Image (tube, coloured by chain):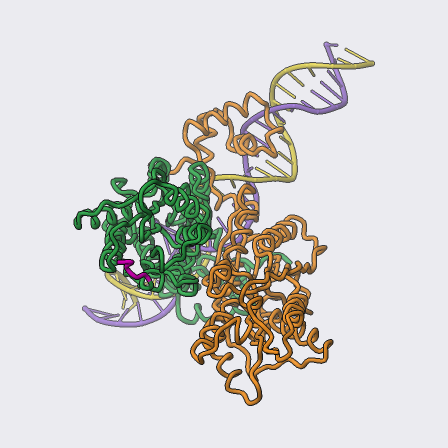
Chain colours: A green, B orange, C yellow, D purple
DNA sequence: TGAAGGTTCGCAATCGATTGCGGTCTCTTG
DNA sequence: CAAGAGACCGCAATCGATTGCGAACCTTCA
């Protein structure tokens, strides 16, 4: 049994396919007599007609599909973002085509080409890194693009992100307030502006109190647990007195840091306070629960989807960059620390 | 500047579009003289030609797109599954169109219709529940469908899942081995066969040792933290001596149970041992680290994608149901318990 | 009654790529 | 040199829905 097409519906309703097309589209329904609309609708119903979005897409030049590019689907912070996007799309007849780059430039290129070939109406990129500008801008000539989470300052590509400068400052303030003086940070990948901003916000705030942030001479390749572990070991191996507080640039790295501390016989809140970033769900349940900086991932996804939709509807470049505020969530990993005195 | 189409490429290469089409397709390249292929390729390169997957999809009746339906993108167990699917698809020119049902039957219906309208080549459903059979089977007449994670026994729909009966037995054995006698379980949603199997596997194994599983007269609405909390409270409020060990049907519910225990002044490994399910990444870092049953989520995603691809290529119904083995991962939440004696 | 104006609807082209069929050209062989 | 065999390639139809244009029809009012 071949597919039921518009032609079949039209035949059954005794009208021309073009009329059936108009009758079935709520936006153009007024171009057709009410009684005809009913007849067509009934015919469609009886035949179980299901429009062909592919054919429609070809003719209209619009697929009602958004591309979503993420760096790492395994990163727990990404889940709420994708969720926010998906929830914003559903109900609008839009769907998300997802792809993973694994932080690989070549893959980013391939993925964008693939999405362009599929004629998606817009693309949301959550995994941009320095070095992706060229391919992104090339793709942008064909499709509206919105960056989410990670942004590329100076690229001119609209971005919905969070204020990581401020996030870094919040972390610094929190540690200062609790009396820390020897304070370190474990930096995320240096080719992602967000991590650079976390670093500079943190560093800057400390400096305002005349304190120099302790850092190791390396940054994480990727913001994952193993790298947090490695950097923490480097830090502890450095000369000089070890820090009493550490800011890890995300929660996964914070776990890695905890591991490394444990291996060296140091316990977390007591010897060294640790603060993470992202407020990944698990941080509330770990041992100890980790103080972290909460970002509005779900909201961020929704907003990114919203601006992507705006961009694809009229080609308005009105929206540029938006930065959502982070919030510090204090937990035992810092609150449990006591000045040795 | 309008889009570059195949016609443009053909014109530049001085051939007919049909020839250009053949030249550009590796599978049909042999139908064209080598030198012509080079000329067409060069023309395409120079013009920056990018095929139109929509038009191609219409003509070929194949979109190279798979639908992926999940219940809850926020469930941490889903991430590796989606990742496995995505990784299997990438490199084959396939992409995933994802949708969320939030465990809602009506939404499942809508989503499947939407995917059918988009002419996806196959659908992977990870969030099926009892009651979804009808809409699934209807969709199945148009598109190959594979169930993943959750399955629907007796529905005849191919499924890649894990052996939850065995998972339940593993949990039971582990607790028995550690000397527990008063053993309870907190059951997940009763309209998902996987949870029923966990329950019966657990129950059955205990019975083989003459022990009756302690249960409350309710199951979780959804397998989430709050429901684990609620059921644990119900359990503690029941008459009779409280259990010394609890099997929560997934890790999130296990956390909820821990919360509830804490609120009543009981501590986890010491007073009550707790075992979860799924081996969500965080379980290794919680306080205490939670014993859990590990499922091969990533592998499962890969295999589901693989069978979906098989199904869409030849319409072979060869593959039916596959069940991957779970493994028990012992951690402190059960190992730390000591028999009161 | 007839012209003007508005409603409905059908015709055919179109979106861009693919493909069955058949024509042309080249080369080989008897 | 003729005929047969391939190798290449072009023509035109096709996938299914949408839309500009204009024809047909109906209403209204002079």
In the rendered image, the quadrant that contains the C terminus of chain B is: bottom right
As drawn, the residue found furthest toward the front would be: A341
Q: Residue at x 46, y 33 (%)?
A: B7
Q: Where does the image place residue A30, in percent across and percent down from the top left?
A: 35, 65
Q: Where does the image place residue B106, in percent across and percent down from the top left?
A: 50, 71
**Residue B203 visible in this rendered orientation of the protein:** yes
In the shown orientation, is residue A87 left or right of residue B25? left
| Image quadrant where residue B144 sits | bottom right
Is A216 one of the magenta-colored residues?
A: no
Position of B213 relative to B71 (above/below): below
Q: Residue at x 66, y 66 (%)?
A: B170
| Image quadrant where residue A104 sits | top left
Is A339 one of the magenta-colored residues?
A: yes
- State which region is magenta: A337-341
Position of A155 relative to A250 (above/below): above
Foreground of the two, B162 or B113: B162
**Residue A140 visible in this rendered orientation of the protein:** no
Q: Where does the image place residue A190, in percent across and percent down from the top left?
A: 34, 40
Q: Residue at x 20, y 50 (%)?
A: A205
Foreground of the two, D29 or A148: A148
Numbered label tally: 0
Position of A215 relative to B202 (above/below): above
Foreground of the two, A199 or A197: A199
Q: Where does the image place residue B149, in percent across and percent down from the top left?
A: 59, 62
As drawn, the residue found furthest toward the bottom would be: B239
Q: Residue at x 46, y 39 (%)?
A: A107
Foreground of the two, B247 or A72: B247
In the shown orientation, is residue A232 left or right of residue B253? left
In the shown orientation, is residue A125 left or right of residue B334? left
In the rendered image, the quadrant that contains the N terminus of chain B is: top left
The secondary structure making up most of the magenta span is loop
């Amino acid at each position: 049994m071949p597919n039921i097409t518009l032609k079949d519906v039209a035949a059954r309703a005794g009208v021309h396919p073009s009329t059936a097309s108009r009758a079935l589209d709520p936006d153009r329904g007024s171009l057709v007599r009410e009684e005809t609309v009913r007849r067509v609708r009934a015919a469609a119903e009886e035949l179980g007609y299901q429009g062909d979005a592919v054919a429609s897409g070809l003719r209209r030049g619009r697929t009602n599909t958004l591309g979503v590019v993420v760096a790492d689907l395994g990163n727990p912070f990404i889940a709420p973002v994708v969720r926010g996007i998906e929830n914003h799309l559903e109900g609008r007849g839009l769907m998300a085509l997802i792809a993973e780059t694994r932080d690989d430039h070549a893959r980013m290129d391939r993925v964008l080409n693939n999405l362009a070939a599929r004629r998606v109406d817009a693309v949301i990129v959550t995994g941009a890194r320095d070095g992706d500008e060229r391919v992104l801008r090339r793709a942008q000539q064909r499709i509206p693009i919105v960056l989410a989470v990670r942004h590329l300052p100076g690229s001119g590509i609209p971005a919905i992100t969070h204020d990581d400068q401020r996030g870094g400052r919040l972390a610094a303030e929190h540690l200062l307030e609790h009396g820390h003086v020897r304070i370190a940070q474990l930096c995320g990948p240096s080719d992602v502006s967000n991590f650079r901003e976390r670093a500079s916000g943190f560093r800057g705030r400390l400096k305002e109190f005349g304190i120099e942030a302790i850092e190791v001479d390396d940054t994480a390749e990727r913001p994952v647990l193993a790298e947090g572990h490695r950097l923490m070991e480097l830090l502890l191996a450095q000369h000089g007195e070890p820090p009493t507080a550490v800011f890890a640039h995300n929660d996964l790295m914070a776990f890695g840091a905890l591991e490394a501390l444990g291996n060296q016989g140091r316990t977390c809140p007591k010897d060294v306070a640790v603060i993470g970033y992202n407020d990944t769900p698990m941080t509330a349940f770990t041992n100890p629960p980790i103080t972290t900086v909460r970002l509005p991932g779900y909201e961020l996804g929704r907003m990114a989807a919203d601006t992507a939709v705006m961009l694809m509807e009229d080609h308005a470049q009105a929206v540029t960059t938006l930065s959502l505020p982070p919030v510090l969530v204090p937990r035992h990993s810092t609150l449990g620390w006591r000045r040795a005195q």
